[in-house]
Image (tube, grey):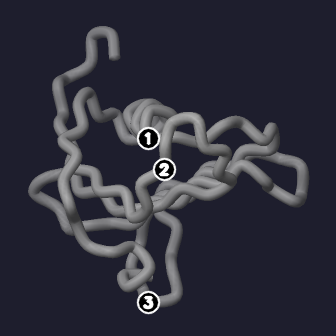
Amino acid sequence: MDGAVRRKGVISFDCLHDDDEDVNCLEGCYRLPPGEWKVFWFNNDEPMGRARCIVDAGFQSGVIGLVVEYNDRRRLSKAVAKRAMSEILKVSEWEEVRGPDSLQMK
């Protein structure tokens, strides 16, 4: 992040996948201190054929978060999610922790 203010976020992945495992969904929680935990959800199989990103997506429970849908079947991994979230949320560094379960939060 060239010239950006250093902003550190906290991230937790629900399911741990190997980097060579082909997954079409990746989710977890993130927090931008001093804020509350939010949910993130990545999908690489957008049925409408268009990529999209919703920064303040609302989930059924009322919790908000980030939804990223790709239309190119790209390989999803922790690194892909962290890179995308850094760009979208203007975060320069992620601390990976064991956080809340996004399925319970949603």
**Residue under pointer 2:** 17
Chain-order first, disc 3 or disc 2? 2
Chain-order first, disc 3 or disc 1? 3
**Residue under pointer 3:** 61
Name which residue type carries label 2.
His
- Mark 2 lies on a secondary structure that is loop
Q: Marks 3 and 2, Cα distance to the nearest angstrom?
A: 26 Å
- Mark 3 lies on a secondary structure that is loop
Residue 18 in the image: x percent, y percent?
49, 43
Q: Marks 3 and 1, Cα distance to the nearest angstrom?
A: 25 Å
**Residue under pointer 1:** 78
Choose mark 1 or mark 2, whichever is in front: 2
Residue 5 in the image: x percent, y percent?
19, 23
Name which residue type carries label 1.
Lys
**Few, some or many C-alpha atoms within 10 Å of disc 1 (few <14, some 14-19, many ≥20)?**
some
Quadrant of the rendered structure where residue 79 is?
top left
Quadrant of the rendered structure where residue 90 is?
top left
